[in-house]
């Protein structure tokens, strides 16, 4: 019996103070799942059992499943099917092998084979972001204003943001990142609760690092951060610790942060060695360079994530390598802010490239929050001095990025790994033409083309985006609310 194909659409809103107004007209009262199709033959979803929350999903017949293997090598499976049970990949097998799955146990079949097929990759890992700042898009005009003046004006706007603005901005950020295939994010910001609220609404996986010493939130303390660490199990996001800059962090705060990181075994992230001036100010306050200061306090290790890292010495890079700390490369942000050039050749020379992940930063540093264009920026930036291969870049935004952030069972497509998956239409300018004798050219095509919107996105075994439509947030209304809030923010600054 043929099963009807439906358009997968699931609206769910849970927003404090009803910032997204008129939400009740767009949600299903029982919070259930409805499968429909608004365009003939547009859906790839077939419903076998009409459960409100499908538990078992068969992804059938993908022409290419692309992932990094357990040895750090690129693996491409052709004509493969995936069985998803709950939030986990249970099996991957040749799509012609009908014995590997009992269809009576499957709730939904996703057809990845027809109409040119769908390429599947792991969801991407964004290792550095400031989600609430999404509301500040257009706050900097790099081609017209003096950079220092622009940054001061942006800071004034940020100081006028309310708790509701923070939540709305983070929703805007997370939904855009999801459209670029990003399923896990390290958020670094001065507030925790709005980021947590937005993560829960959008179902985004977020390491929610809140500043224990913050420029924009000067009243933050390690003790405040600890209240979130104590209640970690009650949150959708994962609490972590952030520092804005070391030169803004007193020795007393560093000592207390070191105790927190050790006590709760959590990530610590910060901006580090972003400009020469910041390095000099760190030396004036702490008597040494940033990496050495962190090492002195016992903070330099696998739980330590340093963003930017432009002005690092060879000794510091070797310490990062030996202590297995992570560094987030942000080439677009560094270029726009004229901070300097990340020394990738030095990392390569000392064998520390496996400690590098990529990040987007915020919309005031990279207007489009995707990692494929960031990978291309890294590729072109270092091309003359040291080649960065496409496989290395793909690894940085998948398996290696997940490993650096301490995310277990994430960043690869393999049995036992979490079902965080990005689905890309193969019959697309970003993929075709490719060398059929060398399918790895699909990866180089993805990166050099950049700018892909995913077709579908799965997080923890649930389709967050399907048939190119967001299943949780009505993006039309969201964009209107973002613009209204941005306009109100600019009006407040005039007063």
Image: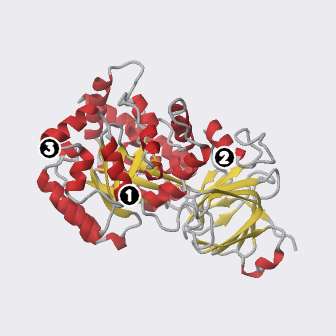
Asked which quadrant contains residue 100, the reply is: bottom right
**Discs 2, 1 touching: Cβ within 8 Å:** no
Provide the secondary structure element on which disc 3 rests: loop
The quadrant the C terminus occupies is top left
Q: Which residue is mark 1?
A: 324
Mark 2 Cα-neighbour bin, 10 Å: few <14, some 14–19, many ≥20:
many
Q: Horizontal placement of 115 versus 482: left or right?
A: right
Spot occupied by residue 256 in the image (x, y as percentages of width and height): 16, 61
Spot occupied by residue 381 in the image (x, y as percentages of width and height): 50, 32
Provide the secondary structure element on which disc 2 rests: helix
- Residue 133's disc is none
| For residue 327, above or below residue 330 | below
Determine the residue positioned at 17% across, 62% down: 223
Determine the residue positioned at 29% across, 46% down: 162
Q: Horizontal placement of 33 versus 360: left or right?
A: right
Nearest the eye: 431 or 494: 431
- Residue 443's disc is 2
- CA distance separating discs 2 and 3: 45 Å
Q: Earlier in the sequence, mark 2 or mark 1?
A: 1
**Discs 2, 3 touching: Cβ within 8 Å:** no
Q: Nearer the viewer, mark 2 or mark 3?
A: 3
| For residue 410, above or below residue 170 | below
The quadrant the N terminus occupies is bottom right
Nearest the eye: 451 or 161: 451
- CA distance separating discs 2 and 1: 27 Å
Determine the residue positioned at 61% across, 62% down: 69
């Amino acid at each position: 019996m043929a099963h009807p194909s439906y358009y997968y659409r699931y609206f769910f809103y849970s927003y404090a103070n009803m910032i997204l107004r008129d939400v009740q007209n767009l949600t299903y009262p029982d919070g259930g799942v409805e499968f429909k199709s608004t365009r003939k033959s547009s859906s790839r979803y077939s419903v076998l059992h009409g459960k409100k929350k499908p538990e078992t999903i068969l992804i059938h017949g993908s022409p290419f499943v692309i992932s990094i293997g357990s040895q750090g090598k690129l693996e491409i499976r052709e004509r493969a099917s995936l069985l998803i049970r709950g939030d986990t990949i249970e099996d991957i097998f040749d799509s012609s092998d009908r014995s590997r799955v009992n269809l009576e146990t499957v709730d939904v079949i996703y057809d990845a084979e027809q109409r040119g097929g769908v390429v599947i990759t792991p969801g991407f890992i964004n290792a550095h972001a400031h989600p609430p700042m999404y509301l500040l898009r257009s706050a900097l005009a790099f081609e017209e204003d003096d950079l220092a003046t622009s940054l001061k004006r942006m800071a004034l706007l940020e100081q006028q943001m309310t708790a509701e603005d923070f939540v709305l901005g983070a929703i805007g950020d997370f939904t855009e990142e999801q459209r670029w295939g990003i399923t896990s994010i390290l958020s670094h910001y001065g507030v925790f609760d709005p980021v947590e609220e937005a993560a829960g609404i959008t179902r985004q996986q977020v390491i929610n690092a809140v500043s224990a010493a913050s420029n924009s939130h000067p009243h933050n303390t390690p003790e405040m951060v600890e209240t979130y660490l104590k209640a970690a199990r009650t949150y959708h996001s994962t609490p972590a610790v952030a520092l804005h800059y070391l030169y803004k962090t007193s020795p007393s705060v560093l000592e207390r942060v070191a105790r927190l990181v050790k006590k709760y075994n959590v990530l610590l992230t910060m901006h580090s060695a972003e400009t020469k001036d910041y390095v000099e100010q760190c030396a004036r306050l702490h008597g040494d360079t940033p990496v050495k200061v962190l090492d002195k306090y016992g903070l330099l290790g696998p739980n330590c994530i340093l963003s930017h890292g432009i002005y690092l010495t060879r000794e510091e890079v070797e310490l990062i390598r030996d202590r297995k700390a992570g560094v987030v490369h942000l080439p677009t942000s560094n270029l726009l802010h004229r901070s300097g050039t990340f020394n990738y050749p030095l990392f390569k020379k000392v064998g520390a490239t496996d400690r590098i992940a990529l990040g987007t930063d915020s919309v005031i540093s990279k207007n489009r929050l995707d990692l494929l264009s960031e990978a291309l920026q890294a590729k072109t930036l270092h091309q003359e001095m040291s080649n960065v291969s496409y496989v290395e870049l793909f690894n940085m935004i998948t398996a290696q990025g997940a490993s650096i952030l301490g995310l277990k069972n994430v960043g690869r497509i393999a049995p036992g790994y979490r079902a965080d998956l990005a689905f890309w239409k193969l019959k697309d300018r970003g993929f075709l033409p490719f060398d059929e004798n060398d399918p790895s050219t699909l990866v180089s095509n993805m990166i050099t083309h950049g700018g892909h919107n995913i077709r579908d996105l799965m997080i923890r075994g649930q389709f967050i985006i399907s048939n190119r439509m967001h299943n949780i947030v009505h993006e039309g209304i969201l964009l209107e609310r973002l613009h209204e809030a941005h306009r109100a923010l600019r009006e407040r600054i005039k007063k």
